[in-house]
Image (tube, coloured by chain):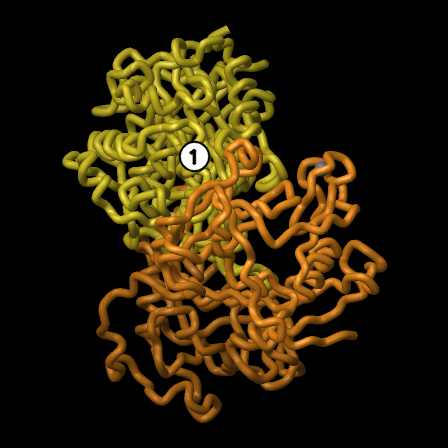
Amino acid sequence: MRRAAVLGTGQTQHQTRRTDVSMAGLCREAIDRALADAGVDWPQIDAVVLGKAPDLFEGVMMPELFLADALGAAGRPLLRVHTAGSVGGATGVVATSLVRAGVHQRVLAVAFEKQSESNAMWALSIQPPFTAPIGAGAGGYFAPHVRAYIRRSNAPEHVGAMVAVKDRRNGALNPYAHLRQPEITLESVRASPMLWDPIRYDETCPSSDGACAIVIGDQAAAEASERPVAWIRATAMRTEPTYFAGKDHVNPRAGAEAAQALWQAAGITDPLAEVDVAEIYVPFSWFEPMWLENLGFTEAGHGWKLTESGETRIGGRLPVNPSGGVLCSNPIGASGMLRFAEAAKQVMGRAGEHQVAGAKTALGHAYGGGSQFFSMWVVGETPGR
Amino acid sequence: MFHFLNSRQGVTLIRLDRTCFTDLVDTASAPPLAAPLDIAFDYTRSLGPVLGRFMTGLRDRRVLGARTADGRVHVPPLEYDPVTHTPVTELVPVSPTGTVTSWTWTDRPLAGQPLDRPFGWALIRLDGADTALLHAVDAGTRESMRTGMRVRVRWAAKRSGDIRDIACFEPDPGPPRAPDDTTSGDPGSAPGTSSASGAGSDPATSGDPVTGIVTPIRLSYTHTTSAEESRYLHALSEGRLLGQRCPACHKVYVPPRVCPADGVPTEEEVPVRDHGTVTTFCVVNVPFPGQRLEPPYVVAQVLLDGADIPIPHLIIGQAGDVRMGMRVAAVWRDRATWTTTPENIAHFRPTGEPDAPYESYQEHL
Ligand SMILES: [Zn+2]
C-alpha cells in the first residue's frame, strides 16, 4: 500500500462557549493552524473531509453544505463522515484512505462541535413513543457498563478518580485544553458529586466548543515537508450493533477486533512494549482501564493495574492522554480527531509541555455510539515496514 | 382505520395497513402502532465578525454585502472568500432596492414563513450586489410576479438583528435607492409591520452590536413500530411480557426485533416472566432538559427470566440497596390504565429472594 503521513495539525482554543466565532470561524481557526503547521497553502489541498457528530447537536442538517466555502471546498471534493463520537477518528481514517489509494496527494480533514449552540444531554435523551422515560444522556448510558467493569475486574474504587487527576493535570500542560486543573487531587475528585452513580462529576468530560484539523499527504508530500511528519503506519475501523443478546459492553468485540487488525497492520506484536504514548477516547475516567484491555495493552481484567501503578502518567511505561484527553476537552465531533492529532504531535516532537520524551510510536483512538463504532491509527517517526 | 386515544400520554395510535417497505403487514395479530414524536429546541447561533455586522446592519435598517478579492459583493455576505479562501473583512452597504432574478409562487404559506398570505419566493439581487438573496415578495397575486421586476425591502417594525428584520420585499416601481435610504415600504400596505421612516428616528439603530441569534427548531415525526415490537406492545396492554427467539442464534429477544447479530426477524414466541435479575444499573442524580422523572432514580438493566437480553427499567427501593444480581419483580399499574406501553409497568421492586449468582447473568450485562 502507498504511504501516507500527517504533515500538520491544528486545533482551536476549546472552551464552554466560543461566542466570538461562528461554526465556520471555529473550523477555520483549526484549519488555518493546521495549514501553517503543515507548511502548505490552499492550492496544494486536493480534497476536504468533514466530520461532525449527530446533526441534532447543533440543529443544522448537513452543515457541510453551508460550511463549504469556509472549509475551502469550492472546486474540490468534499465528503462528510458520520460515526457519532468516533467521527473525528473516522474522518482521519477516510482522509488517509484517499491518500493511500492514490486518489489525492494532500487531503484536509477537519472535525468540529459547537456544543454551546444546543444541549447534547437533551439531544441524546429524546424519548420515542412506546418507551419508558428512562434515558439520561451518555452518562446514563455508560454508567451501568462502568459498574459492570468494576465488578468484573474487581478494580479498587479509587482507580476512576486516579484517571481524572492524571488527565486534568495533564490538561494543565496543554494550552488548548478546556479544563486545566493543576491543583486537582484524589480527595477533591472523590468529594465531587455523583452524577450517574458510579460516575462522579470530576470523572466526566466537559461540554466544549472546538475544532481540529489535520493535513495528510502522500509519500512525496511527506518527503517534501521541511518539518518532521508523522507517518501513518496503520489505520483500522470496526462496527457492531449497539445492542444484541450477549453484547460485551465492557470489552466490545468491534474494538478488540479493530485493535488486533491495527497492531497486525502496523507490525506491532507487543503493544505495551512498542507503543510509546496513547491518546485514547476516555469520556468517563473508568474508560481508561476498560480500553487499555480492549486495545490489548493488558489482558482482560488487568487494565486498572497499569493505571493504578502510575504507568499511564507522563514518564510512565505507557503515557495515556498526555494532552488531557476527552476529560479535559470535549467538542464531541472533534474529540476523536484530537486524539489522532495529539498522537501525531507526539511523534513529530511538537507536543510542547505535554511532550513524551523520545516518543517514536503513538496510538490515536476513538469510539462512538453505544460502543458501536471504533476507529484508530498508529503513527510513527518513521514509515515502518 | 383504527384510532385509539392513550389518555395517559395523550397519544393517538393509528393503525397502518402499509409501511414504506411492505405491502401488507399482519395487522390481524399485531397492528403496527403509530404516534406523534415532536421535538423542539431553541438553538443559539454565535455569528462571528461578518454575520454579526450583517445582522447589526439589518437591525439598523441597512443591508451590508461582503466584498471578495475579485471585487464581487455578496449579499447575504460570505464569511470566507470562495476563491482565495481568505477571511472576508470588507463589508459595504448596498441598496434596499433590487431586481428579481428568478421566482416561484406559494399559494398556501406554511407556519413560520415570512407571510401568511400567498406570496412569491424570489431570488433578489439588490442594487450594488453581485449575488442574489432568497426572500419573500408580497406581490398579491402570481400574475404580478415576473423576472426582472423591481422590489424594495419592507422593514419589520420590531427588529432584533435577524434575517426577519426584513419582513419581506414589495414591488417598487421607483428608481434605485441609495444604500443609506433606510425608509421602509409603504406602511399602509403592511399593517403592523412598519410605522417609522427615516434613519435616526428609530431607537433600535443605536443598540449594541448583534453577536448571536436564536434559531428555534421544531421537528414533527410519526413514529411507527415494527410488526415485532407491535406484538410486544399489544401483549403489554394485556399485562403480558412477550419475547421471541431468533431462528439463527436461538437467543430470546425482549422486545422482539430483527436480531441485530444475524439480521433475521425473531419468530418463535416465548413467554417471559415479569420477574428478573438486575444485571447492572445507574443511579441518575443529574437533572437535564426534557427529563420526565425527578432525580435521583435508579435505571437498571433487568434480565427477565427466560430472556437473553436485558430491558432497561426503573427500580424502586432504597437507591443504596440496589445491587447487581438483585432479584426483582414488575409492579404493574392499575389494569384499567393499561395501554400499549412499557409504562404499564410502573417500576420493578426487590423480591427479597437471594441474589442471582454473577455467572448466571455475566453474559447479559
Ligand atoms: Zn440471532
- Residue A374, above or below B159: above
Residue B88: horizontal and vertical position, in percent?
Answer: 35, 50
Residue that protrudes farthest toward the front in the picture: B353
Task: Report the residue at 61% width, 68% height from top.
Answer: B36
Q: How crowded is mark 1: few (under 14 residues within 10 Å), some or many (20 or more)?
A: many
Q: Quadrant of ligand 1?
A: top right
Chain under callout 1: A
Q: Where is residue B205 in the image (x, y as percent from the top left)?
A: 26, 75
The residue that label 1 is drawn on is A336
Residue A199 as seen in the image, left or right of residue A75: left
Q: In which quarter of the image is the N terminus of chain B?
A: bottom right
Q: Colour of chain B?
A: orange
Q: Residue at x 59, y 79 (%)?
A: B119
Residue B336 vs A139, above or below: the answer is below
Q: Can residue A50 be seen in this view?
A: no
**How many numbered marks appear?**
1
Depth check: A301 or A135 in front? A301
Identify residue type, mark 1.
Answer: Gly
Q: Which residue is drawn at 67% across and 66% down?
A: B237
The percent position of residue B272, horizontal first and vertical second, equals 67, 50
Position of residue B169 in the picture relative to residue B251 (left or right): left
- Asked whether residue B284 appears in the rendered view, the answer is yes
Hue used for the chain lettered A: yellow
Which image quadrant for residue A103?
Answer: top right
On the picture, is A6 further left or further right than B245?
left
Q: Is residue A319 above or below residue B63?
A: above
Looking at this view, name the residue that lies furthest to the bottom: B188
Give residue A367's position: percent from left, percent from top. 48, 34
Callout 1: SS: helix
Residue positioned 42% across, 43% down in the render: A143
Left or right: B245 with respect to A161? right
